[in-house]
């Protein structure tokens, strides 16, 4: 008996109307953004209401004087306000995709909706990656900002000298004079993320001059945020395993970070994993074979985010309606905040709200 077999090309294939987009993490920095001066990523949208190319971010340093007591004269013993200024230039960024309307008839998914979805994901990824680049950026004059991978060794040495009170190399055994030489001292025995080095980063933030201001919560709680890639975050998890096991309330159950893999909390530090924070190029650590990655302790006003136009969808239809393009556009600027001295605030510029730590990993 002959059995009838339906040829492959005549079989009905039913595709789901829904589609699966590539998984792209939402912007993990979003909770750190705000318009107030305590926000780690300070957002300024002045240019959405006015025309202009730059947004100025102002800082008034805390007073350090002791004042006068009793019958001592205050006149003539006033303290000068330390007012600083940081400018961020905005620029336009656009991205788009294009399809022929004919393919809407052939496609198993809604091409128009798919384009909008992936473009918005691209925007979130773009903001996240620019913040990461800004955190690692090198500036010797407070005006020109160069991505770490593109900065010269000479510029890194100048930046290190300017920021020696807010850059940590592992267990702090480095000399803080030669960037590449200091990296070459890092090994996987002692120069890793642990309770000692986390405390060293926090102490550096508190003792820096100017001080790196903590993030204030409910007026009296002071916190810093430490962001790092997956490799260093695993070190932190190991170092804090006992702390989390013994300190977290047992009744939290599934909400305990031991189970959820969420943020770690230790000694006034919120430790966040940002997988996209990668290692430094090559193997710059001990013996030229050791990998090194950065961790960033972030306080208030660490990053300036200037917005002239928030992201918006744009479209282009041509060829008598046959070609349909959709895109996203924003006008903004993202920079690590530097405050210097002198009339133009550019002499000996220091990164204002960031302690940069370099740590070895296997």
Image: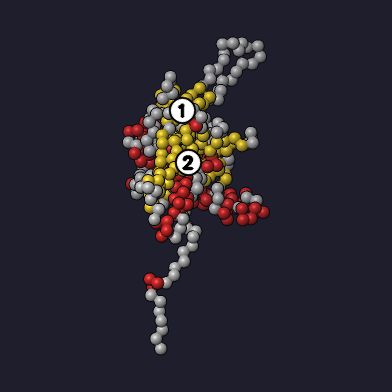
Q: Using the image as rendered, state which of residue 90 and residue 95 is in the foreground.
A: 95
Q: Which residue in the protein does label 1 denote?
A: 51
Q: Using the image as rendered, state which of residue 224 and residue 170 is in the foreground.
A: 224
Q: Using the image as rendered, state which of residue 307 and residue 168 is in the foreground.
A: 307
> SS for tag 2?
strand
Give the x, y percent position of residue 347.
41, 24
In the rendered image, the quadrant that contains the N terminus is bottom left
Q: Who's the residue at 49% across and 27% down the image?
A: 50
Give the x, y percent position of residue 101.
40, 53
Q: Which residue in the protein does label 2 denote?
A: 312
Question: How much space separates mark 2 and mark 1, taking CA atoms?
Answer: 18 Å
Q: How crowded is mark 1: few (under 14 residues within 10 Å), some or many (20 or more)?
A: few
Say the numbered circle drawn on residue 211.
none
Which residue is at the far bottom?
1
Inspect this view and state whether residue 201 appears.
no
Q: Using the image as rendered, state which of residue 227 and residue 206 is in the foreground.
A: 227
Give the x, y percent position of residue 140.
38, 30
> SS for tag 1?
loop
Q: Who's the residue at 38% across and 38% down the image?
A: 147
Which residue is at the far front?
320
Sequence-first tag of 2 and 1: 1
Colour setup of the view = secondary structure
Residue 146 location, quadrant: top left
The reply to whether the C-beta atoms of the residues labelled 2 and 1 are less than 8 Å apart is no
Give the x, y percent position of residue 42.
52, 34
């Amino acid at each position: 008996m002959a059995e009838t077999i339906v040829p492959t090309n005549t079989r009905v294939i039913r595709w789901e109307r829904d589609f699966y987009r590539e998984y792209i993490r939402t912007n993990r920095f979003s909770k750190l953004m705000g318009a107030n001066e305590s926000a780690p990523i300070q957002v300024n949208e002045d240019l959405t209401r006015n025309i202009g190319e730059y947004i100025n971010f102002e800082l008034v340093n805390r007073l350090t004087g002791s004042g006068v007591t009793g019958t001592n004269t205050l006149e003539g013993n006033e303290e000068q306000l330390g007012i600083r200024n940081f400018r961020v230039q905005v620029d336009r960024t656009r991205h788009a995709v294009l399809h022929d309307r004919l393919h809407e008839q052939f496609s198993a998914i809604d091409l128009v909706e798919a384009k909008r979805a992936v473009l918005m994901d691209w925007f979130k990824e773009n903001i996240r990656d620019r913040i990461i680049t800004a955190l690692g950026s090198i500036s010797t004059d407070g005006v020109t900002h160069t991505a770490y991978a593109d900065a010269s060794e000479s510029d890194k040495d100048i930046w290190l000298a300017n920021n020696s009170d807010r850059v940590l190399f592992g267990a702090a055994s480095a000399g803080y004079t030669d960037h590449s030489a200091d990296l070459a001292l890092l090994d996987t025995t002692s120069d890793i993320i642990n309770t000692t080095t986390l405390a060293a980063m926090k102490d550096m933030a508190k003792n820096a001059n100017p001080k790196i201001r903590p993030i204030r919560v409910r007026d009296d709680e002071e916190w810093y945020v430490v962001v790092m890639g997956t490799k260093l975050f695993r070190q932190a998890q190991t170092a804090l395993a006992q702390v989390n096991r013994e300190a977290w309330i047992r009744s939290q159950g599934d909400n305990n970070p031991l189970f959820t893999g969420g943020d770690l909390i230790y000694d006034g530090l919120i430790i966040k994993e940002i997988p996209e924070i990668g290692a430094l190029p090559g193997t710059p650590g001990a013996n030229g074979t050791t990998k090194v990655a950065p961790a960033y302790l972030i306080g208030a006003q660490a990053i300036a985010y200037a917005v002239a136009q928030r992201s918006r969808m744009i479209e282009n239809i041509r060829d008598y309606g046959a070609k349909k393009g959709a895109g996203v556009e924003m006008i903004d600027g993202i920079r690590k905040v530097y405050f210097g001295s002198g009339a133009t605030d550019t002499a000996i510029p220091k990164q204002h709200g960031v302690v940069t730590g370099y740590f070895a990993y296997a």
